[in-house]
Amino acid sequence: MPRGRKPANGKSIDTQISDIDAEIEEYKQKIALAKEKRKELKNRREKQEMEVLYKAVRASGKSPREFLDTLKEHADRL
């Protein structure tokens, strides 16, 4: 007497759904870690840019306000 078809890969549909759910959770964790790493890298880049800007202000011999005023004057000329 036939007992129905066996699943193609030997797993029930419920098991396959559970496997997929577990896979989705794994990818969610990987995405969260990647986003955190991206955030850290952006922060490092911003810090480096701020250091370059600070060095430029210091090298100019001007106060930060004077430096900004000079930049604004140059921008207004363009």
Image (tube, rainbow, N blue to C red):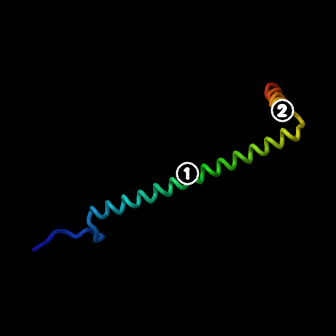
Please rate how many residues cluster around mark 2, counting C-alpha atoms within 10 Å: few if below 14, some from 14 to 19, many from 20: some
**19, above or below 61, in the image:** below
Alpha carbons under labels 2 and 1: distance apart: 36 Å
**8, above or below 34, in the image:** below
Secondary-structure class at tag 2:
helix
Q: What is the number of the mark on residue 77?
A: none
Q: What is the number of the mark on residue 67?
A: 2
Q: Residue at x 57, y 52 (%)?
A: 36
Residue 11, x across and y down, in percent: 28, 68
Labels 2 and 1: the sequence-earlier one: 1
The quadrant of the rendering that contains the C terminus is top right
Q: Residue furthest front?
A: 63
Q: What is the number of the mark on residue 35?
A: 1
Secondary-structure class at tag 1:
helix
Q: Residue at x 88, y 41 (%)?
A: 59
Q: Is residue 27 left or right of residue 5?
A: right
Q: Amino acid at mark 1?
A: Lys
Residue 17, x across and y down, in percent: 31, 60
Q: Residue at x 75, y 43 (%)?
A: 50
Q: Is residue 3 left or right of residue 42?
A: left
Q: Residue furthest right?
A: 61
Q: Residue at x 42, y 57 (%)?
A: 25
